[in-house]
C-alpha cells in the first residue's frame, strides 16, 4: 500500500484568506512575517515524472516554494508548466517561472490560466536569457512581452478578470506574482527604480540574482528602504554555494549578470576542501543578508548541488525552528494501513474458525 | 588552384570578430550572429544619447510644427501622406537612432536610445544580464541600449518619463509612421477639448 494514497488533500488549494491574492502557502508564510526560503528545481531532460518527484523530495520540509525554471540559460529542459503540474499533484508549492524568450502573449496568457487551474499559486515573470546563451543558439528569440508588461498582463488577468485584449475570463487566476531583480549589474542607480517600476507593474515578491557581494546588496537595500519599497513587496535574496574557485571563475566570465568579487574567489582558493568552503560562504552570506532590514527571505540556488540545500538551510538556522510543509499522512491513514496489512495476510478457513471458536 | 582565401575572398573582419580576438581566452564569446545584429558603428546612436537634452527640445518643437501642419495632412489625407512621411521618418530616425520602425516611438521616455535595438527588445529597462562594462549580454560589443537610455534620460528635462511602465509593442503598427499617428492623436484631442469648451 503506497503512502501517497493517504496524503491529506494535498492537491486542494488552501481556503481563501482576506488580504491574500493566492491560495498557496508561500504568500501566507511571507504575509505572516516569517523568513521564507525558496529554492530551484533542476529541470530534468526526461519524460519521466519520477525524475521530478525525486528532485523535489530532497527539498521537502526545508523550503516554502520551489521554482520551476523555464529553460533557464536558454537550455532546453522539461517545461516549467509540466514540472509545476507534477509538483502540485504531490502537494508541493511550485513557483512557475515564465520567460518571455520563448512564447508570445497568446501562449503566455494560456499558460497562466492552465497553471492556475492545476493549482499553481505563484508565478514569476522573467525576461529570460538570450537564445545565444543556450544549447540552441539558432532559435528565434520571441520577446513579445517583457517582464514588466508580462507582470502587468498577469495582474490584469487576476484583478480585472480580463485578457490583454479585454476579453473576459470566467474565473480569473488566483496567483501571487513575482519578479527577479539584479542589484549587481549596471546601471546601478537605476536598479532600485526598476524595482519600483516592477512593483507598479504588479510584482508582489522578488527574488534576486546570486548575491556574493553583501555590501553592494546592502547599499541597494538602503535605497530600496528609502523609497519604502520593502513595504510594498517581499524581497528574497538569491544565494547559492560555489563548487570551486574554478567554477566561480568560469561563472564570472561566462554567465552575464553574476558578480563574484575577488575576495570570494581567493577565499575559495585558500580552502582545503573547496566544496565545503563554498557551502560555508553561502551560509555566511545568508547570515549576513538576513540581518538586513527589508529582506524577507532567501532563495537558495544550488544548481547540481541540490542535496546541499537542506544542510545550508539547517546550518544557517534561518527557519528558526519552523518546519515548512512536508507530506504527512492523513490522521487515520496509519490505522487504515494496518488494517490493510491484516487483510493482505489471508487467513485459512481453519484459522478463522479457530479464532471465532476461541 | 588552392582553396586558401585570397585577399578578396577572405571574410570581412566584423566588429564582433575583432572584439572576440582581443578578448581573454576565458571570456564569454557568443555566436557571431544574432537576428538583430547589424554591422554598424554605434557612434551616431551614442551621439544622440549624449545630446538627449537638445534632441528633446528639438523634438518638441518639431512635433508642434507637425501639429500646425494638421490641416495640410488632412487636406492630402493622412492615408496618402503615410508613405512619403514613413520614408522620411525611416531615413532620419534610422540615421540618428538606428530606428527599427516599431511605429510607436518611445524615444522621449528612453533617453533617446531606441529600445528596439536591444536584442530582447525590452521597453521597460535593462535586463539582469548587463555586463560590468555596461555592454550588452547578447552582443558583447554593443553598449547596452538601456545603460545608454538611463544616462540619456538623466540629461533630459523630463527625467521621470523613463519610470513609466510601457505597454507591450503592438506589432500591427510596425513599419508605419509614428510621427503622423502622434499628430493625428494630438489633433483629435485638441478638437475634443475645443468641443468641450464650446
Ligand atoms: S544587456 Fe541591455 S541591450 Fe542587451 S539584452 Fe539586456 S537590456 Fe537589452
Image (spheres, coloured by chain):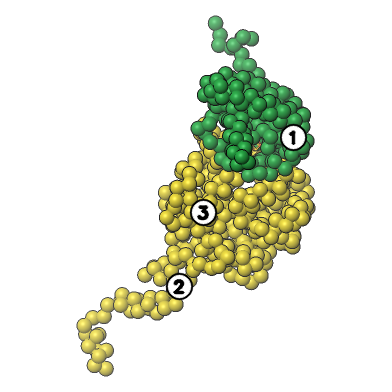
Chain colours: A yellow, B green
Instruction: Give residue A108's position: percent from left, percent from top.
Output: 49, 45
Instruction: Give residue A263's position: percent from left, percent from top.
Output: 78, 49
Q: Is residue A17 left or right of residue A356?
A: right
Q: What is the chain letter for disc 1?
A: B
Q: Is residue A335 left or right of residue B160?
A: left
Q: Which mark is residue A160?
A: 3
Residue appearing at x 60%, y 35% in the figure: B191
Q: Compare residues A232 and A278 and report the one nearer the observer.
A: A232
Residue identified by numbered label 1: B152
Is the shortest distance between ligand 1 and the CB of mark 3 under 8 Å?
Answer: no
Examine the rendered structure and indicate whether residue B25 appears above or below residue A42: above
Q: What is the chain letter for disc 2?
A: A
Examine the rendered structure and indicate whether residue A283 appears above or below residue A265: below
Q: How many other residues sit within 10 Å of disc 1, few (<14), some (14-19) or many (≥20)?
A: many
The quadrant of the rendering that contains the N terminus of chain A is bottom left
In three-dimensional space, the C-alpha distance between marks 3 and 1, rounded to whole angstroms, equals 35 Å
Residue appearing at x 65%, y 60% in the figure: A297
Residue identified by numbered label 2: A329
Amino acid at each position: 500500500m503506497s503512502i501517497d494514497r493517504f496524503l491529506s488533500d494535498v492537491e486542494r488549494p488552501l481556503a481563501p484568506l482576506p488580504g491574500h491574492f493566492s491560495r498557496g502557502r508561500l504568500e501566507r508564510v511571507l504575509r505572516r512575517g516569517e523568513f521564507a526560503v525558496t529554492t530551484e528545481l533542476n529541470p530534468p531532460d526526461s519524460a519521466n515524472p519520477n525524475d521530478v518527484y525525486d528532485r523535489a523530495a530532497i527539498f521537502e520540509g526545508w523550503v516554502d516554494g520551489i521554482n520551476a525554471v523555464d529553460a533557464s540559460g536558454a537550455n532546453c529542459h522539461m517545461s516549467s508548466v509540466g514540472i509545476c503540474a507534477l509538483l502540485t499533484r504531490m502537494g508541493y508549492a511550485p513557483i512557475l517561472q515564465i520567460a518571455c524568450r520563448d512564447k508570445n502573449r497568446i501562449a503566455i496568457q494560456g499558460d497562466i490560466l492552465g497553471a492556475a487551474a492545476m493549482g499553481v499559486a505563484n508565478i514569476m515573470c522573467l525576461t529570460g536569457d538570450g537564445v545565444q546563451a543556450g544549447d540552441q543558439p539558432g532559435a528565434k528569440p520571441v520577446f513579445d512581452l517583457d517582464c514588466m508588461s508580462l507582470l502587468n498582463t498577469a495582474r490584469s488577468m487576476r484583478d480585472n478578470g480580463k485578457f490583454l485584449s479585454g476579453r473576459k475570463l470566467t474565473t480569473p487566476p488566483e496567483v501571487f506574482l513575482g519578479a527577479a531583480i539584479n542589484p549587481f549589474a549596471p546601471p546601478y542607480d537605476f536598479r532600485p527604480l526598476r524595482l519600483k517600476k516592477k512593483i507598479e507593474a504588479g510584482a508582489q515578491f522578488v527574488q534576486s540574482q546570486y548575491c556574493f557581494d553583501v555590501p553592494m546588496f546592502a547599499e541597494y537595500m538602503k535605497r530600496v528602504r528609502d523609497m519604502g519599497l520593502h513595504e510594498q513587496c517581499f524581497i528574497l535574496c538569491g544565494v547559492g554555494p560555489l563548487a570551486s574557485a574554478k567554477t566561480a571563475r568560469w561563472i564570472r566570465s561566462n554567465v552575464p549578470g553574476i558578480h563574484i568579487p575577488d575576495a570570494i574567489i581567493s577565499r575559495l582558493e585558500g580552502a582545503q576542501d573547496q566544496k565545503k568552503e563554498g557551502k560555508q560562504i553561502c551560509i555566511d552570506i545568508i547570515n549576513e543578508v538576513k540581518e538586513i532590514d527589508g529582506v524577507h527571505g532567501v532563495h537558495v540556488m544550488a544548481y547540481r548541488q541540490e542535496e546541499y540545500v537542506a544542510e545550508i538551510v539547517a546550518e544557517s538556522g534561518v527557519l528558526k525552528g519552523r518546519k515548512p510543509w512536508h507530506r504527512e499522512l492523513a490522521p487515520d491513514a496509519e490505522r487504515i494501513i494496518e488494517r490493510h496489512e491484516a487483510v493482505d495476510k489471508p487467513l485459512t478457513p481453519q484459522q478463522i474458525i479457530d479464532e471465532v471458536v476461541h | 588552384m588552392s582553396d586558401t582565401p585570397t585577399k578578396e575572398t577572405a571574410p570581412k573582419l566584423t566588429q564582433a570578430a575583432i572584439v572576440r580576438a582581443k578578448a581573454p581566452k576565458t571570456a564569454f564569446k557568443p555566436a557571431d550572429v544574432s537576428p538583430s545584429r547589424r554591422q554598424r558603428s554605434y557612434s551616431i546612436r551614442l551621439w544622440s544619447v549624449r545630446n538627449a537634452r537638445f534632441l528633446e527640445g528639438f523634438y518638441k518643437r518639431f512635433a508642434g510644427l507637425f501639429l500646425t501642419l494638421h490641416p495640410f495632412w488632412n487636406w492630402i489625407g493622412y492615408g496618402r501622406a503615410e508613405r512619403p512621411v514613413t520614408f522620411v521618418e525611416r531615413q532620419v530616425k534610422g540615421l540618428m537612432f538606428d530606428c527599427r520602425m516599431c511605429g510607436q516611438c518611445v524615444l522621449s521616455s528612453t533617453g533617446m536610445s531606441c529600445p528596439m535595438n536591444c536584442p530582447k527588445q525590452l521597453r521597460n529597462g535593462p535586463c539582469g544580464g548587463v555586463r560590468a562594462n555596461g555592454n550588452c549580454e547578447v552582443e558583447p560589443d554593443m553598449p547596452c541600449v538601456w545603460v545608454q537610455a538611463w544616462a540619456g534620460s538623466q540629461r533630459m528635462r523630463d527625467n521621470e518619463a523613463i519610470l513609466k511602465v510601457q505597454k507591450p509593442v503592438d506589432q500591427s503598427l510596425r513599419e508605419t509612421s509614428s510621427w503622423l499617428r502622434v499628430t493625428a492623436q494630438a489633433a483629435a484631442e485638441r478638437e475634443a477639448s475645443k468641443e468641450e469648451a464650446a
